Image (spheres, rainbow, N blue to C red):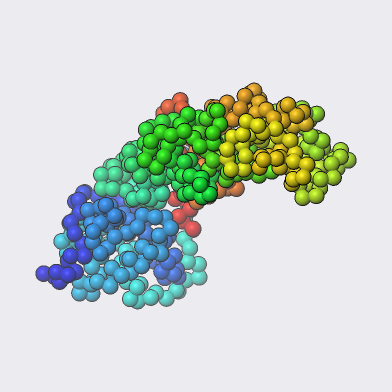
């Protein structure tokens, strides 16, 4: 044997596909001299990691055919440093002077996965450089180490070659389904290049682990998980999992009539309200966002599910007649402000009507929910005369409205439509034109690590929404994932982000 039994057992057999990494090479590697000027971490992250994934990760991952060997890669996007350490450790094993990783990948030593990269190819040069630099650190000899070859924005999926397609899918796969592209999916990439993206995404959506991506997204949006103070903060995530598992429309995240426990059994949502509004009628949402005048509950509803911040466009959310508001919120100038409390710890004291003319309508929907997230029929929405501004009695919050009977009622108006309570309002938000583009944005945020402050072209989100609705009038989470990550602009953006 050319290697000891102990070394040979490092790797076990893997499905032998015709997918070989040199099939994915579109061009020669960008100047090797520039690699010498990068740290191990930067070279691995920006250049070598996509090659390592393509060569090894189909089998050398948990659950893969080589998932029980000493060389197992982690799919988490945050595990680059850990994976570098694993490759560095494996590189210490040699077949003569050749790192065993390279000998196996080129099938110089018989490899269960067959020849995964051709000696002399661009990918071979990258992997050899990576494995060699661990023993022989390179010396920088150029002034500018970064290549000047940005990806040109494509107009169609057909513009992406196989290497770009695989790099893209292996970037998003760990975040969507906690794994890398598998052998059969890789074969589709080799055969169809960028046009394989929708097919591979469909296989992602059939992976049960997609449920976890939906849970993570909702838990991130609502900062709700686990248990605390007797409140089950996992209910929003449980509902997200149920909708994915049962292939229900994603709009039911706001309109579902039931909640679900950790075993996916239907239960009553726990706020005690005489109506339901999906995650909005969980104590996880309500208690986690309790604040004066119910402003945080209202702003989260708009931001998380409509992607609006206050003030909203007037044609989206008409303002309430200012005479219906308590005097503080009627002011549009400093001269109009008649309530000294407006400048003592609450707001800027003027211009209140611009935002609160809309805030008031959405906050009123929560007037009967106390700080613990329980619905209280007796809530009256009146300011506690001895309490902090914006707080009512019995751990409830103050209404914006000046008429006592109106202040105690949940009746309001959302996006120009009259509603009787939060349950009605949730249906309006879920059926509004903004819901699907916003859901696509939140999926992008959750997968790319961006947030609400990141600028995303509205035209892109509109195109994704159109594609999602072409799949189903009321799209599922899977429909949204396929539409979002099949968009060529998204593909290019993710790849461009890898170019540093």
Q: Residue furthest left?
A: 1
Image-quadrant location for residue 244:
top left
Residue 154, how many percent across, how many down?
A: 46, 42
Determine whether 243 is above or below 19 in the image: above
Q: Which of 44 and 64 is in front in this view?
A: 64
- Which quarter of the picture shows residue 239? top left
Judge left or right: residue 345 versus residue 483: right
Residue 200 seen anywhere in this rendered image of the structure: no
At a point 46% along the width and 60% down the height, the residue shown is 147
Left or right: residue 173 compared with residue 423? left
- In terms of image quadrants, where is residue 475? top left
- Give the residue displayed 71% in from the left and 42% down from the top: 391
**x and y percentages locating residue 492 in the rendered image:** 46, 46
Task: Tell me residue 352's x, y (percent).
Answer: 77, 39
Q: Is 408 or 333 nearer to us in this picture?
A: 408
Residue drawn at point x = 29 percent, y = 55 percent: 61
Relative vertical location of residue 17 with respect to residue 49 in this rendering, above or below: above
- Residue 485, above or below 418: below
Residue located farthest toward the right when viewing the structure as drawn: 335
Give the image location of residue 386, x and y in percent.
77, 45
Please name the residue shown 45% across and 74% down the image: 141
Quarter holding the N terminus?
bottom left
């Amino acid at each position: 044997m050319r290697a000891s039994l102990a070394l040979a057992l490092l790797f076990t057999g893997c499905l032998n596909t015709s997918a070989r990494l040199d099939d994915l090479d579109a061009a020669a590697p960008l100047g090797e001299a520039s690699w010498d000027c990068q740290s191990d971490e930067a070279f691995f992250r920006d250049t070598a990691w996509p090659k390592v994934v393509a060569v090894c990760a189909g089998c050398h991952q948990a659950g893969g055919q080589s998932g029980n060997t000493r060389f197992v890669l982690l799919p988490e996007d945050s595990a680059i440093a850990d994976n570098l350490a694993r490759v560095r450790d494996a590189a210490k094993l040699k077949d003569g002077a050749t790192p065993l990783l390279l000998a196996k990948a080129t099938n110089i030593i018989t490899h269960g996965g067959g020849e995964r990269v051709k000696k002399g190819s661009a990918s071979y040069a990258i992997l050899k450089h990576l494995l060699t630099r661990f023993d022989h650190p390179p010396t920088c000899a150029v002034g500018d180490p970064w290549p000047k070859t940005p990806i040109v924005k494509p107009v169609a999926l057909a513009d992406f070659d196989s290497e770009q397609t695989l790099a893209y899918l292996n970037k998003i796969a760990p975040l969507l389904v906690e794994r890398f592209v598998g052998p059969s999916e890789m074969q589709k990439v080799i055969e169809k290049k960028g046009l394989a993206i929708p097919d591979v995404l469909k296989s992602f959506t059939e992976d049960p682990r997609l449920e976890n991506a939906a849970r993570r997204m909702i838990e991130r949006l609502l900062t709700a998980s686990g248990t605390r103070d007797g409140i089950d903060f996992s209910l929003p995530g449980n509902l997200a999992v149920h909708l994915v598992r049962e292939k229900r429309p994603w709009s039911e995240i706001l309109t579902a009539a039931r909640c679900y426990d950790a075993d996916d059994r239907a239960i009553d949502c726990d706020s005690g309200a005489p109506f339901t509004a999906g995650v909005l009628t969980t104590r996880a949402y309500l208690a986690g966002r309790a604040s004066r005048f119910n402003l945080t509950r209202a702003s989260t509803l708009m931001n998380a599910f409509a992607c609006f911040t206050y003030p909203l466009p007037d044609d989206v959310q008409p303002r309430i007649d200012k005479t219906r508001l308590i005097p503080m919120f009627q002011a549009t100038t400093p001269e109009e402000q008649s309530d000294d409390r407006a400048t003592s710890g609450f707001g800027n004291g003027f211009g209140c009507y611009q935002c609160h003319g809309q805030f008031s309508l959405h906050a009123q929907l929560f007037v009967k929910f106390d700080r613990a997230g329980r619905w209280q029929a007796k809530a009256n929405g009146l300011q506690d005369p001895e309490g902090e501004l914006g707080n009512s009695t019995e751990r409830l919050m103050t209404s914006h409205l000046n008429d006592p009977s109106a202040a105690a009622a949940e009746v309001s108006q959302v996006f120009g439509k009259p509603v009787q309570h939060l349950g009605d309002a949730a249906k309006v938000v879920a059926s509004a034109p903004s819901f699907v583009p916003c859901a696509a944005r939140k999926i992008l945020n959750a997968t790319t690590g961006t947030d609400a402050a990141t600028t995303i072209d509205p035209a892109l989100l509109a195109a994704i929404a159109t594609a999602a609705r072409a799949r189903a009038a009321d799209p599922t989470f899977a429909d949204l994932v396929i539409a979002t990550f099949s968009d060529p602009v998204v593909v290019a953006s993710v790849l461009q982000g890898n170019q540093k």
